[in-house]
Amino acid sequence: MSNHARIRDREATEKLKEIVKHQGICMMITNVDEHPTNSRPMGVGEVDDEGNFLFLTLRTSRKYADVTKDPRVYLYFANPGDQEFLSVLGTAEVLNDMAKKKDLWNPLAKAWVPDGVENPDLRVMKVVPQDGYYWDTRDGKVVAAVKIAFALITGKTSDDGGVEGRVKV
């Protein structure tokens, strides 16, 4: 198990799961100190009970090479229909866990990994959140008193009627 901070607030983890349920595709940015950075859309396999984002990836991919050099990644979620937006800075870890690969496998993954879950290059990429920022509107779903927090949350009401806040470890 990693020594990275974990989301300890159950409500925060549930909020992350809710956002991902509404918008399961994010933009993953790697190579964060280089310009240009590398970005690509990624389907989130799940947000686990510790608030980590799990993805399937191939060890032959560019993102795999990027996170082996620098594990920092940004994840950007946008759900304009419900006015939910989330940005997360996290640290990527790559796991070779067959049970988790099978758990995350879905028919869409076959488009990128035609030979299936048994592909020896298939890996699970876990992104452990370190910091983040979200936006949600009052007219959208209840924000649970704006308690999306990793260990602490600072939120404020913006002039445009939305709710926004910084989330940090």
Image: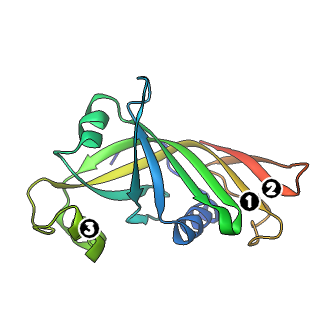
Disc 3: CA contacts within 10 A as few (<14), some (14-19) or many (>=20):
some
Please identify, in this view, whether the residue under mark 3 or under mark 2 is nearer the observer.
3
- Residue 136's tag is 1
Q: Which secondary structure lies at badge 2?
A: strand
Residue 118 image-quadrant placement: bottom left
Q: Residue at x 63, y 48 (%)?
A: 151
In the displayed structure, 34 sits above or below 165; it is above
Disc 2: CA contacts within 10 A as few (<14), some (14-19) or many (>=20):
many
Q: Is residue 57 left or right of residue 138?
A: left
Q: Amino acid at mark 1?
A: Asp
Outermost residue on the right side: it is 159
Q: Residue at x 12, y 53 (%)?
A: 121
Q: In front here: 49 or 133?
A: 133
Q: CA distance from mark 2 to mark 1?
A: 5 Å
Q: Residue at x 60, y 44 (%)?
A: 132
Colour scheme? rainbow
Where's residue 55, x and y in %? 34, 58
- Residue 109's tag is 3
In the displayed structure, 2 sits above or below 35; it is below
Where's residue 5, x and y in %? 49, 43
Q: Amino acid at mark 3?
A: Ala
Q: Are marks 2 and 1 in contact (CB under 8 Å)?
A: yes
In the displayed structure, 58 sits above or below 72; it is below
> Do we see residue 119 in this rendering?
yes
Outermost residue on the bottom side: it is 107
> Do we see residue 106 in this rendering?
no
> Residue at label 2?
163
Where's residue 117, x and y in %? 15, 68
Q: Amino acid at mark 2?
A: Val
Q: CA distance from mark 1 to mark 3?
A: 30 Å
Q: In front here: 133 or 28?
A: 28
